[in-house]
C-alpha cells in the first residue's frame, strides 16, 4: 500500500500511524493507493497517478468525502481485500480557441464553459452531431460525470447520478434563455459539442477540472475510453444512501 495524504489538519499524524503499521512504498511499487483527505485531494491523486492504473482506496480526513471511506487505522488490509470496486471513465475535452489552436484535457468531475466578462455567454449545443439547443443564453454550461455530479453540477441545480451510472449530465449555469430548459441526462457514449456564438464580443473559457483555456470558439466533450479509474469502497459504504442524503441536505 502506498499512502498519499493531503495537507488537511491531522493528515501528517494519520500518515505516520499508517506507515508505521503497514510499511511504506512509493506509488510505482504499490498494489493499491490509499488516499487520505477529501474529494478534492482524491481528484488530484486520480489525475496525477492515472498512468499507474492502480485501484484507489480513500479515507476521509477532509470536509467533503463523497468518494471516501471512513478513516480507521486497524484492519486496513482486510478492508481493501473486501472492498467493492467502482470503475469511472473520465471525460476528454478538446478545445478550439480564437487563434486557431487546439487543446485537450481530461476531466474526472466536469467540463465547464463560463463567460469571461459581464456579457452572458451565447452557446449552441449539439449532441452526437445533432443540434439540440440553438442558442443558450447563460453564464455557461457543464458536462459532469457521475463522480462530478455532486460537485459543481449540484450547485448549478443539476441532478445527481449514482457512481457507476453509464451516463453524464448536461447542465446550464444560470440560464436566461431558454428559461424552461434545465439540462439533460445523456448516455456516457454521447459526444457533446458547444459552439460559442459571438466569441469576440462574448468571450468564453473552458475548464476540465482544473485545466483552463480562454477565448474558446468550440468545445467537444466525450468519454475517455482509454482511462478507467478504479475506486474501492467498504461493503457497508452505501453510495445509494449518500446520494439520497446529498439530495435532501439543506
Image: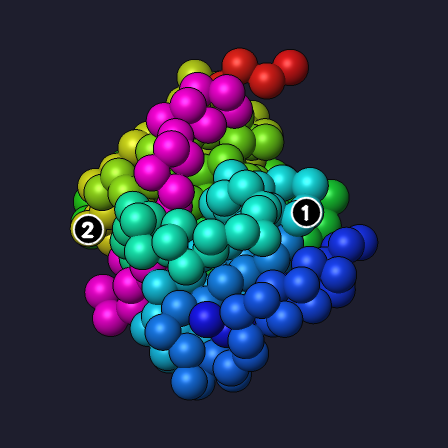
Badge 1 marks a residue whose secondary structure is loop
Q: Residue furthest right?
A: 9
* Snapshot quadrant of residue 77: bottom left
Q: Residues within 10 Å of mark 1 (few under 14, many from 20)?
A: some
| Spot occupied by residue 23 in the image (x, y as percentages of width and height) | 54, 76
Badge 2 marks a residue whose secondary structure is loop
Q: Which residue is mark 2?
A: 189
Instruction: Determine if residue 148 is in view.
Output: yes
Is 144 on the left-hand or right-hand side of 202?
left
* Snapshot quadrant of residue 143: top left
Name the residue at 60% across, 57% down.
Answer: 36
Quarter containing the C terminus: top right
The answer to whether mark 2 and mark 1 are in CB contact below 8 A is: no
Q: 72 above or below 212?
A: above
Q: Earlier in the sequence, mark 2 or mark 1?
A: 1
| Magenta region, residue range | 221-246
Tell me, yes or no, whether the highlighted magenta stretch contains residue 227: yes
Q: 46 above or below 9?
A: below
Name the residue at 36% across, 74% down.
Answer: 31
Q: 217 above or below 238?
A: below
| Spot occupied by residue 100 in the image (x, y as percentages of width and height) | 46, 78
Q: 143 above or below 210?
A: above
Tell me, yes or no, whether the highlighted magenta stretch contains residue 133: no
Instruction: Determine if residue 211 is in view.
Output: no
Is 65 on the left-hand or right-hand side of 165?
right
Q: Which residue is mark 1?
A: 62
Rounded to the nearest angstrom, the CA distance separating label 2 from label 1 is 33 Å
Q: Tell me the mark number nearer the camera, choosing from 2 and 1.
A: 1
* Snapshot quadrant of residue 14: bottom right
Name the residue at 67% across, 63% down.
Answer: 17
Name the residue at 63% across, 71% down.
Answer: 20
Closer to us: 163 or 103: 163
Amino acid at each position: 500500500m502506498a499512502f498519499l495524504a493531503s495537507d488537511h489538519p491531522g493528515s501528517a499524524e494519520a500518515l505516520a500511524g499508517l506507515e508505521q503499521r503497514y510499511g511504506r512504498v512509493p506509488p510505482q511499487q504499490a498494489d493499491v493507493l490509499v488516499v487520505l483527505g477529501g474529494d478534492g485531494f482524491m481528484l488530484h491523486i486520480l489525475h496525477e497517478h492515472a498512468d499507474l492504473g492502480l485501484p484507489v482506496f480513500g479515507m476521509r480526513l477532509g470536509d467533503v468525502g463523497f468518494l471516501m471511506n471512513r478513516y480507521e487505522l486497524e484492519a486496513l488490509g482486510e478492508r481493501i481485500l473486501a472492498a467493492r470496486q467502482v470503475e469511472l471513465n473520465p471525460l476528454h475535452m478538446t478545445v478550439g480557441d480564437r487563434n486557431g489552436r487546439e487543446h485537450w484535457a481530461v476531466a474526472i468531475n466536469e467540463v465547464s464553459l463560463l463567460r469571461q466578462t459581464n456579457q452572458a455567454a451565447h452557446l449552441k449545443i449539439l449532441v452526437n452531431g445533432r443540434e439540440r439547443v440553438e442558442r443558450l443564453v447563460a453564464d455557461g454550461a457543464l458536462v459532469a460525470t457521475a463522480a462530478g455530479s455532486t460537485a459543481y453540477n449540484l450547485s448549478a441545480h443539476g441532478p445527481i447520478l449514482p457512481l457507476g451510472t453509464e451516463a453524464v449530465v448536461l447542465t446550464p449555469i444560470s440560464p436566461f434563455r431558454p428559461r424552461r430548459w434545465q439540462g439533460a441526462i445523456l448516455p456516457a457514449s454521447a459526444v457533446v459539442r458547444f459552439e460559442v456564438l459571438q466569441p469576440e464580443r462574448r468571450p468564453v473559457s473552458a475548464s476540465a477540472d482544473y485545466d483552463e483555456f480562454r477565448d474558446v470558439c468550440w468545445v467537444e466533450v466525450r468519454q475517455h475510453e482509454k482511462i478507467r479509474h478504479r475506486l474501492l469502497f467498504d461493503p457497508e459504504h452505501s453510495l445509494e444512501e449518500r446520494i439520497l442524503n446529498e439530495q435532501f441536505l439543506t
